[in-house]
Image (cartoon, rainbow, N blue to C red):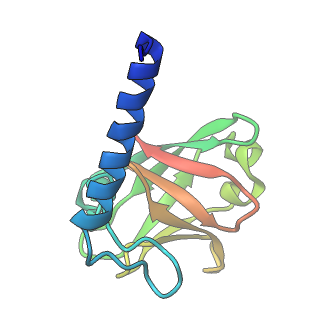
Amino acid sequence: MRFSAVTIINCVTVTGVASMMLVGAYQNKDYVPGSDGIDTISTASVQAHVDTRPKALADRFTVRNHADGRSCIVKLHRADGYNVHRVEPSENCGAVTASLATARAWREGNDGLVAITDRSGKNLMKLVPSDGFAWEVIEPRNIAISLEAF
């Protein structure tokens, strides 16, 4: 009985895939998904701890509205020893989002989050550290804005 080259290649491929599946099944017997079904194994692409120290040096940000592409500049006037700093939005920040035009304070929390407030202390938006020297707005949820240090 004679086999064609395609048949031999298919047999080798199926055998290789089956071997990989068997090795994978027996290699990590301790793996159990979390009780909520979420994968509990962390990878190198997931940062374990957020380091906000480089952002502490930033004093100017480009604010980008990802919904319509508008942007503006926000200056941050830091006060050493305090967790509340003065925010100075540029004139066109009202076009990016109306609440940003009234921003006056940058309040850093112990949890690494930042709240941007108006003159009365009302939260306008809450920021979370993002990749590199950037922040992303997580509240309010209806705006897609990021602040990138430069």
Q: Is residue 139 above or below residue 16?
A: below
**Residue at x-position 60% and y-position 41%:** 64
Residue 22 can be seen, yes or no:
yes
Q: Where's residue 100, x and y in %?
A: 67, 56
Counting from the top left corner in percent of width and height, residue 121 is at: 60, 80
Q: Quadrant of residue 104?
A: bottom right
Percent x, y of residue 1:
42, 17
The residue closer to the viewer here, 136 or 29, is 29
Q: Residue at x 69, y 35 (%)?
A: 70
Q: Is residue 140 left or right of residue 52?
A: right
Place residue 29 in its image quadrant: bottom left
- At 46% from the left edge and 44% from the top edge, which residue is drawn? 148
Q: Position of residue 8 (x, y in %)?
A: 39, 21
Residue 65 figure quarter: top right
Residue 72 falls left or right of residue 110: right
**Foreground pick, 101 / 116:** 116
Q: Is residue 144 above or below residue 39?
A: above
Which residue lies most toward the bottom here? 35
Q: Residue at x 51, y 49 (%)?
A: 147
